[in-house]
Image: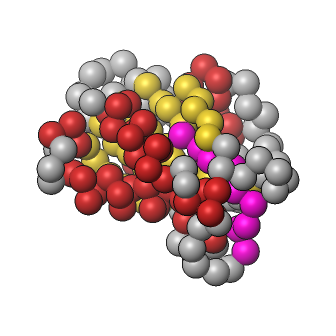
Amino acid sequence: MNRHGTGRRVVIGVGNDYRRDDGFGPLVVAGLAERQASDRRLAAVDLRVSDGEPTRLIDLWTGADVAVVVDAVLDDGHHSGLRYELVLDALNELPEESAASSHGISLGSTVALARALDRLPRRLVVLAVSGSEFGFGEGLTPPVAAAVTPVIERACELVA
C-alpha cells in the first residue's frame, strides 16, 4: 500500500454509458464534474471514468491518498437501486472471481493485483449500486437513477 501521503484524491466512475445500468459510475462522475466549480470540497479532486480494465483502474488510483470507485453491480432484479459502501478491508474479503462484476475481472482481483504491485491508494472506498439491466442501450433503470444524487453526495463527503 502506498504509504506516502500526497493529498491526491480521485473519484473513478467505472462503467459504460451504452450498457444501461452500467452507466451509473460515469453518470456520478459527470454529476461531480458539474459541481466541481461551485463546491470547494471538489476543487482539487481528480475525476475520472474507466471501463474497469484492471491496469487502467490501478493507474488511475496509484499515488492517491483517497480513491473512491463508483460502479454498478449485477443484481437479480429484486434489489435494484440498493446502495453499498465498501472500504478496503471489506474488499479483502471479496472472492477474486465474483459473479457480481459486470466487467471482465472482479474488483477483488484488481485489488489483489494492486496490492501485489504496491499500488493501492492509502484509502480505497467503493460506492456501488445494484443494477438489473446491463444490455445495450442508454439510460439507467429508475431504481439505479434514483441512487445517483445520494452517491454524489456521499462521494463529496469521502473526498472532503
- Inspect the magenta stretch and tell me whether residue 124 lies in it: no
Tell me where residue 28 sits by quadrant: bottom left
Identify the residue at image location x=67%, y=43%: 82
The residue shown at (51%, 47%) is 70
Residue 142 vs 79, above or below: the answer is below
Marker count (numbered): 0
Query: Which span is picked out in magenta?
Result: 127-135
Left or right relative to 92: residue 28: left
Q: Nearer the viewer, residue 20 or 125?
A: 20
Q: Nearer the viewer, residue 127 or 152?
A: 152
Q: Is residue 131 magenta?
A: yes
Q: Left or right of 80: which side holds 62?
A: left
Indicate the position of residue 85 as horizontal and vertical percent values: 57, 32
Asked which quadrant contains residue 66, the reply is top left
Residue 114 visible somewhere in the drawing: no
**Residue 46, x across and y down, in percent:** 28, 48
| Residue 61 horizontal/vertical position (percent) | 41, 41
Q: Residue at x 42, y 30 (%)?
A: 121
x and y, in percent, of residue 135 in the image = 73, 74
Question: 127 left or right of 100?
Answer: left
- Residue at (81, 56) in percent of width and height: 77
Q: How is the image coloured?
A: secondary structure
Asked whether residue 121 is in view, the answer is: yes
**In the rendered image, which quarter is residue 34 located in?**
bottom left
Considering depth in this image, is 62 or 70 the residue closer to the camera? 70
Given the current orientation, which residue lies at the most extreme bottom position? 137
